[in-house]
Image: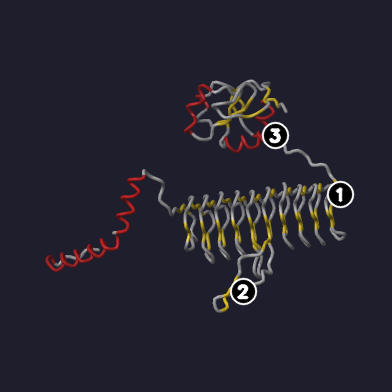
Amino acid sequence: MSIRLGELAEAVGAELRGDPEIAIQGVGTLQRATQGQLSFLSNSAYRRYLAETGASAVILSQEAASDCRVAALVTDNPYLAYARAASLLFPVAQAVPGIADSAVIAASAEIDKSASIGPCSVIGEGVRIAANVVVGPGSVVESECEIGEQTRLVARVTLCHRTRVGARCLLHPGSVLGADGFGLANDQGRWVKVPQLGRVWLGDDVEIGANTTVDRGALEDTILHDGVKLDNLIQIAHNVEVGENTAMAGCAGVAGSTKIGRNCTIGGQTGLVGHITIGDNVHISGAALVSRSFPEAGYYSGNLPAMENSAWRKLIARLRRLDNMAKDLKLLKKTVKSLTGESFK
């Protein structure tokens, strides 16, 4: 697809500085873009590549525009403008309505005529599928599930019994919604399974990454509100609730009954214990262990950054002696007080 630069500028709401007739056929990084491609600058660390870029045009901020020697699309949010431009240049292919011959469809399923049901997919009893839904190859939609309009199950997606997915959601391959939560009761050393009777409930515009799992609630539902974005390989346990427009990076894990507010970001490999509350606008850095509630908005971290190995070994050695050092300090303070009469906090 080819789009005039002037049309792109208007579509993304950017100020055009340059020839509006330039044809844009693709996108690329500042370092590798070539003639006919659009690039962007949203991180100042890459500003040095502006002078040598081969791109036909660059999306950037007002502050960086003075360094740009090619056509520019100037905007306050270059990354957002790039996202919109790339979506225009590379639109998602429209699925062909209809049901593949190899699909298995229960007699009581209600499927809008505009929906696309892919090969080897299975649609259970009482399922309701709205307009323009795409159920990709090998996907399984169990009984009494609901899928809102324009939602897409890419391939091999599983929706377990009674899962509800809103409109315009995107579920990537291998994602599983509505499997049993990890509920076990102990009977004299033997584990007894606790029935998981809730559901998974997704709002609108939710995205679920590849091989991410969202477990059904034990009694109440597991809920992901509108606009939630989950990366790949994330585990959401039973009865968790995630507020609007919260995003989590890969390999994060949220234990049962934890509540996460709106507009939060959870870094990769972060683990949240169960039965805690995370407030709105909380941002947690990667690989943190969150063992208590954070009700107040803010930025939280909880892990040591990587360092040179010898420095790390020295640090760990000191940490191991920390308890003895604290005892020595307490004794020293007591001695100083006995000699001088002064106290130290």
Amino acid bearing label 3: Phe
Q: Is residue 178 above or below residue 211?
A: below
Taking depth in this image into account, of 52 and 305 the one nearest to the observer is 305
Q: Is residue 280 left or right of residue 19?
A: left
What secondary structure is marked by label 1? Answer: loop
What secondary structure is marked by label 2? Answer: strand
Q: Which image quadrant for residue 78? A: top right
Q: Which mark is residue 45?
A: none
Taking depth in this image into account, of 217 and 36 the one nearest to the observer is 217
Count neighbours of disc 1 (C-alpha within 10 A) and say few if under 14, some if 14 to 19, many if 20 or more: some
Q: In the image, residue 226 lies at what x, y percent?
A: 66, 54
For the residues labelled 2 and 3, the Cα–Cα distance comes to: 51 Å
Which label sits in the foreground, 2 or 1?
A: 2
- Mark 2 touching mark 1, by CB under 8 A? no
Q: Which residue is mark 2?
A: 192
Q: Is residue 248 left or right of residue 141?
A: left
Q: Please, which residue is most extreme toward the left here?
A: 339
* Residue name at image x 77 percent, y 50 percent: 149
Taking depth in this image into account, of 282 and 302 the one nearest to the observer is 302
Q: Which mark is residue 90?
A: 3
Amino acid bearing label 1: Lys
Q: Which residue is mark 1?
A: 113
